Amino acid sequence: MVVLRIRGRMKFHVLSTLSLTNGLTPEHTFIYAKGKKCLLNTLTFGAGTILCSPGRVVAKQSVAWIGAVFGDGKRFFAGQKATFHYAPFTGF
């Protein structure tokens, strides 16, 4: 299990990839961002559970994410060709 805590904003730049290696699966990857915004920019690929609290979630064009994405409910923006595939979080 990997837990990544981000104190500020979470931002994946253009052409970013979050690669899971050594047998790590999306069900065992948890990203907690405490900033105002969680940005998955154009051509971002990755996997895991993202908890963006208290921020908003923005996914620009051609984002592919495998896992769950949670925001505070204020705003969720998914651009053109953004795809999200749900992988249930089974707990710690």
Image (cartoon, helix red, strand yellow):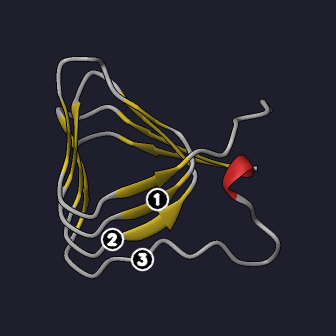
Indicate the quadrant containing the C terminus: top left, top right, bottom left or bottom right: top right
Tell me the CA gap for discs 3 and 2.
6 Å
Under tag 1, what secondary structure? strand
Mark found first going from the N terminus, 2 or 1? 2
Q: Which amino acid is tagged 3?
A: Thr
Residue under the point 30% across and 19% down:
72
Tell me the crowding category of disc 1: few under 14, some 14 to 19, or many 20 or more residues within 10 angstroms, Cα based: many
Residue 52 left/right relative to 23: left
The numbered mark at residue 17 is: 3
Tell me the crowding category of disc 2: few under 14, some 14 to 19, or many 20 or more residues within 10 angstroms, Cα based: many
Residue 39 left/right relative to 87: left
The numbered mark at residue 54 is: none
Badge nearest the viewer, 3 or 1: 1
Mark found first going from the N terminus, 3 or 2? 3
Mark 3 in CB contact with mark 2 (< 8 angstroms): yes
Mark found first going from the N terminus, 3 or 1? 3
Under tag 2, what secondary structure? loop
State the residue position of label 1: 65
- The image quadrant of residue 11 is bottom left
